[in-house]
Amino acid sequence: MKKVFVSGGSGYIALHCIARLIQKGYFVKTSIRSLSRKQEVVDSISKVVDCDGKLEFCQLDLLKDDGWNDALDECEYVLHTASPVSLLLSNNPDDLIKPAVNGLERCLNSAVKNNIKRFVMTSSFSAIGAGSKEKELDDTNWTDINNPNISPYDISKTKAEMFLWEYVSKLDKSKNIEVCSINPVIVVGPSLSKDIGVSNTVVKKILDGSSPMVPRFGVNLVDVKDVADMHIEAMINPKAAGKRFLLSSESLWFTEVSNILRLNNFNKAPKFTAPNFLVKILAIFDKELKIVLFYLGFKNTLYSNNAKKILNWKPKKVNQALIDTAKQLYELGILK
């Protein structure tokens, strides 16, 4: 049974990756910051697959060297999903950037030491087109880290992925390791745990009744099940080495997302689109709305060329993922 190391095992995407790996016959070793969360992860995975005897844990911290050298022992592949996540503006960018880059370096060093065959990094669209108003973007684009319209999170994901490619380019040929990156847009779909993930807060915001209107801007979405499947396909596909994989299923106006939910009896979803001038006024008092201002009235088209051509990806429509997420939010009592 081939062994795969998955970092950040309690995370939203990581849990789906672990479940799919076990379903496909792999043994998984995963890291969590505290072993006190071990049972939580087991319970989450067990909702979809029996993980008894197929999953082991280790305690690792992105900011500490302890344990990294031995963590990947006997593993053949690595899915590095661990990274700090925040959609809010931070006064200290290092809170995100340092863990993202330093944690990646620790994982890469261990991967090289343990002769890992393929290293798959969970990157983000944040490293491809954050702060960009280009109408069309694909796998080849990179975020400008000097752009004043991007967040510390965008910078952290971009710098981390840049570090990945720079690190590999400087390796001695005798220590060669195959790497690739997965760059999803906003990921939606039910969580396997009670933590719905940061990206699903998009659905929560639409349904929490806090606003009768939604701003006019585009959102790019992808189903979390697709994201997990593409991690695994990128891990084993011979042609995936050295590639970036932008994953975007659909580009929708925010109003369209709201309409999908309303048509499925989630009646708190707003009916109307807010005029741009109103959003600008409200942003004076709402920190989160300030992030939206730059994209008002804008929607782009993203091309997942590598995923479709190399990994044979056939994206799912996001309708069901949105509906199932909404249902889970009520089941968990997050929404009333």
Image (tube, rainbow, N blue to C red):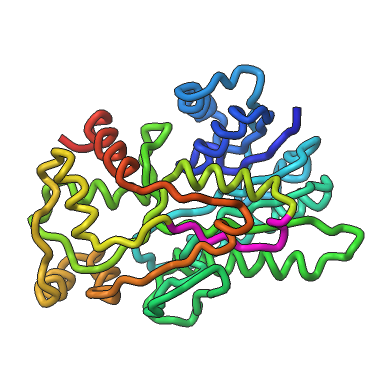
Q: Please tell me which residue is depicted at 73% across the width and 39% down the height of the picture.
A: 71
Residue 286 higher or lower than 136, as above or below:
above
Horizontal and vertical percent position of residue 269: 14, 48
Placement of the N terminus among the 4 image quadrants: top right
Image coords of residue 142 (percent x, y): 54, 74
The answer to whether one can see residue 99 in this image is no
Residue 156 image point, x, y percent:
52, 65
Count of numbered circles on the image: 0
- The magenta stretch is 239-248
> In the rendered structure, does residue 240 fall within the stretch colored magenta?
yes
Question: From what the image shows, is residue 167 above or below residue 258?
Answer: below
Q: Residue at x 29, y 69 (%)?
A: 291
Report the quarter where the C terminus lies.
Answer: top left
Residue 257 is covered by the magenta coloring? no
Residue, x 70% and y 49% (percent of image)?
A: 237
Across and down, in percent, residue 106 comes to: 70, 53
The residue lying furthest to the right in this view is 174
Direction from residue 51 to residue 319 in the image, left or right? left
Question: Residue drawn at (54%, 51%), measured in percent from left and top?
Answer: 313
